[in-house]
Image: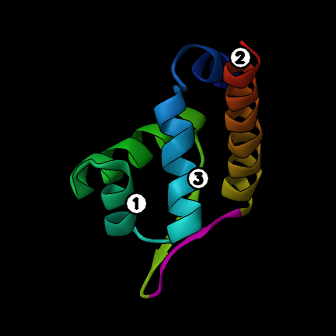
Amino acid sequence: MARLDWYIRANLKPRHLQLLVALDDLRSVSRAADLLNVSQPAVSKGLAEIERGVGVVLFDRGKRGLVPTLYGECLIGLCRTMLQSLEAAGEEL
């Protein structure tokens, strides 16, 4: 658990949060790449990096696109909360 805590505190960046939310909203690597103005390989690499860091699979990949696993749903919900908090901080400042 200490490794997971370290990964989240030291390596999880706002761009990772945005990536996970975009993948959840769009359920497609290519559409998420378009939204985030990055390449499809960058999205795939970013997701793989996050999954390695947290040690679980966050999305199942299938013919109909990406579907969040239970772990993915949990982390995506937290990502949405963190992004909302960052947006609120920006507005308050």
Q: How is the image coloured?
A: rainbow
x then y, percent, for residue 80: 71, 45
Q: Earlier in the sequence, mark 1 or mark 3?
A: 3
Q: In the rendered image, which quarter is residue 4 located in?
A: top right
x then y, percent, for residue 74: 77, 51
Label 1, residues with CA under 10 Å away: few <14, some 14-19, many ≥20: many
Element class at badge 2: helix
Q: Residue at x 50, y 37 (%)?
A: 16
Q: Residue at x 64, y 16 (%)?
A: 9
Left or right: residue 32 versus residue 58 is left
Q: Nearer the viewer, residue 4 or 82?
A: 82
What residue did someone put label 2 on?
2
Q: What's the CA distance linking mark 2 and mark 1? A: 31 Å
From where the camera sits, is residue 1 visible? no
Q: Residue at x 66, y 64 (%)?
A: 69
Left or right: residue 22 versus residue 70 is left
Q: Tell me which amino acid carries mark 3.
A: Val
What residue did someone put label 3 on?
21
Q: Which stretch did the figure color magenta?
A: 64-69
Q: Is residue 68 magenta?
A: yes
What residue did someone put label 1 on?
32
Q: Earlier in the sequence, mark 2 or mark 3?
A: 2
Q: Nearer the viewer, residue 3 or 28?
A: 28
Label 2, residues with CA under 10 Å away: few <14, some 14-19, many ≥20: few
Q: What's the CA distance linking mark 2 and mark 3? A: 25 Å
Q: Is residue 49 magenta?
A: no
Main secondary structure found in the magenta portion: strand
Q: Quadrant of the C terminus?
A: top right
